Amino acid sequence: MKKIEAIIRPEKLEAVKDALEAIGIPGMTVTDIKGRGRQKGIALQWRAGEYRVNFLPKSKIEIVLADEKCQTAIDCICRAAKTGKEGDGMIFVLPVENAWRVRTSDSGEACINACINGSK
């Protein structure tokens, strides 16, 4: 199993959610975060002068999937989140040793597949 952590522009969140649902991945965790990368924030103009915003608002999407579905999800996120401008985001893939569903105590890929396929 793999955990995908995608940091994207907040205005692209709905597009990414819809794209993932379209390929059969409805479950995800979303967190509103702030961050900065190579662009080191942005300069904004306000009344009398310019000021710098060092940390920009971003959305973090977390998904745990079976290994074979990982690349499809990454490709989907890239297509839906891309604007072609600096600050589009990053995707990180981490190994997941195991997972448990609290209500049923199911574990492993069966737990993850049940969440994706909508089984109870």
Image: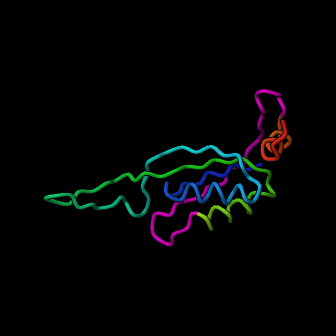
Q: Which residue is drawn at 80% across and 51% down?
A: 66
The answer to whether residue 105 is left or right of residue 13 is right
Residue 26, horizontal then vertical, whole percent: 72, 49
Q: How is the image coloured?
A: rainbow
Name the quadrant containing residue 38: bottom left
* Count of numbered labels shown in the rendering: 0
Q: Is the magenta stretch mostly helix, strand or loop?
A: loop
Magenta stretch, residue numbers: 81-106
Place of residue 24 in the rendered image (x, y in percent of width and height, measured from the top left): 77, 55
Residue located 71% across and 55% down the image: 21
For residue 84, above or below residue 77: below
Q: Quadrant of the C terminus?
A: top right
> Compared to 102, does 20 lie above or below?
below
| Residue 78 in magenta stretch | no
Taking the spot 37% from the left edge, 60% from the top edge, the residue there is: 40
Residue that lies at the very extreme toward the bottom in this rendered image:
84
In the image shown, does 41 or 10 lie closer to the viewer? 10
Q: Position of residue 60 (x, y in %)?
A: 55, 49
Image position of 75 with respect to 18: above or below: below
Up the image or down, 95 lies above or below 90; here it is above
Residue at point 51% right, 69% down? 83
Residue 72 image point, x, y percent: 74, 63
Magenta-span inclusion, residue 88: yes
Q: Is residue 53 left or right of residue 1?
A: left
